[in-house]
Structure formats: C-alpha cells, structure tokens
C-alpha cells in the first residue's frame, strides 16, 4: 500500500518535471522576430521566428529571394534576400563572418547558381562556411526563386554575454 501511495504522490511531480524538460531549448533561447509589423503578423500567423539564439548558436529561418515584375536580372532578388539575412544576423548579435552553414533551395539550380554565387561573394568571405544547394519544385511566395537558410555561431567572447 505504501508503495502505491508513494508512487501516486510522485506521479504529479514526475509529470511536471517531464513537461518542464519538454519545454525545450526555445524556452531558454532568445527568439528574434521581425520588426516590420506586416512581416511580424505573417510570422505570428504561420508560427515561426526570424531567428533563434540558443547559447552560441544562431539559426535563421529561410529567407526567400524573389523576382519582381519586370526584373530580368536574378541578382536583384538575391541582393534583397542577402540584405534581409544580414539584418536578421545583426538583430541576433552576429555577422556574416559568424556564418558556419548555408542551405539554399532553388527552383532552377542551373540558371540560378551564377547569380547567387556572384551576390553571395559580396557577403561571404574566406574561410567559407559549408553550403548545400538543393533543387525544389516551388517556393512560397509564387515569385520565389531561392530560399536561403543560415546557421551562425557567436564568437566565444560574444557568446558569454
């Protein structure tokens, strides 16, 4: 009997601890949201952040490069995307020098690689991060040509703050 009552008494405590453990790293992290009200509404509706800073790691959501009506040079869309990514990196307390991994999702790798490489080289300098480029069938929004996702790591002195 005593064992049963002890187990029954411990069950709520164990469930509470399990729930606390499940709360996860985001509870201890700094979440970076958009400052633009329209973009912030979109993030809240879809349920995502611009970036999550957890310890010394900074993970950015993908930013979509798109072409505007009448644009024929893909580089303009990539410049806008890299500028947006740079702003998020700044808001998260890191820079392009802290980027350790890039993943890009392309609707047409063959035609898009020269343009993204040209623009990326204006922001990313040696030593280079890892980079994986993946072909996909489509992106949101419909004018999206490439989605770029970044992981950065804070320098040791910055991570301590």
Image: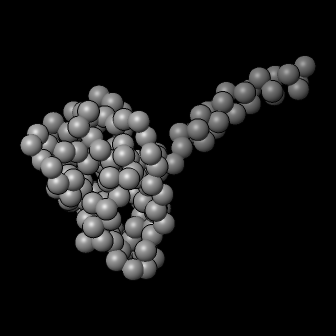
Q: Which residue lies furthest to the front in this view?
A: 110
Q: Name the outermost residue toward the top.
A: 1
x and y, in percent, of residue 75 in the image: 21, 58
Q: Is residue 103 left or right of residue 70?
A: right
On screen, residue 63 above or below 48: below
At 45% from the left and 70% from the top, the residue drawn is: 129
Q: How many marks?
A: 0
Q: Quadrant of the C terminus?
A: bottom left
- Residue in the foreground of this view, choosing between 23 and 68: 68
| Residue 58 figure quarter | bottom left
Note whether residue 154 is visible: no
Say which of 139 and 19 sits in front: 139
Q: Residue at x 45, y 54 (%)?
A: 133
The image shows residue 23, relative to residue 118, as above or below, that is above
Q: Determine which quarter of the picture holds residue 18.
A: top right
Which residue occupies the extreme left position in the image? 70
- In this rendering, position of residue 24 left or right of residue 156: right
Q: Give residue 94's position: percent from left, percent from top.
A: 33, 67
Q: Which quadrant: the N terminus?
A: top right
Q: Quadrant of residue 125?
A: bottom left
Residue at (46%, 62%) from the top-left corner? 131
Colour basis: one colour
Relative horizontal placement of residue 29, taking residue 81 as reference (left or right): right
Residue drawn at (22%, 45%) of the image? 66
| Residue 82 place in picture, x, y as percent | 25, 59
Residue 117 in view of the camera: yes
Q: Is residue 98 or residue 115 the one in the foreground?
A: 115
The percent coordinates of residue 88 (x first, y second) are: 27, 56
40 lies above or below 3: below
């Amino acid at each position: 009997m005593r064992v049963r009552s002890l187990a029954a008494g411990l069950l709520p405590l164990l469930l509470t601890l399990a729930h606390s453990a499940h709360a996860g790293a985001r509870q201890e992290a700094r979440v970076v949201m958009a400052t633009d009200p329209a973009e912030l509404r979109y993030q809240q509706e879809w349920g995502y952040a611009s970036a999550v800073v957890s310890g010394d790691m900074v993970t950015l959501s993908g930013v979509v490069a798109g072409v505007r009506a009448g644009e024929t040079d893909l580089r303009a869309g990539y410049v806008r995307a890299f500028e947006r990514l740079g702003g998020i990196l700044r808001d998260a307390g890191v820079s392009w020098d802290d980027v350790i991994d890039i993943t890009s999702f392309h609707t047409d790798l063959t035609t898009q690689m020269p343009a993204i490489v040209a623009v990326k080289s204006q922001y990313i300098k040696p030593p280079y991060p890892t980079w994986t480029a993946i072909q996909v069938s489509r992106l949101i929004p419909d004018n999206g040509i490439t989605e770029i996702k970044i992981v950065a790591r804070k320098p040791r002195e910055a991570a301590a703050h």
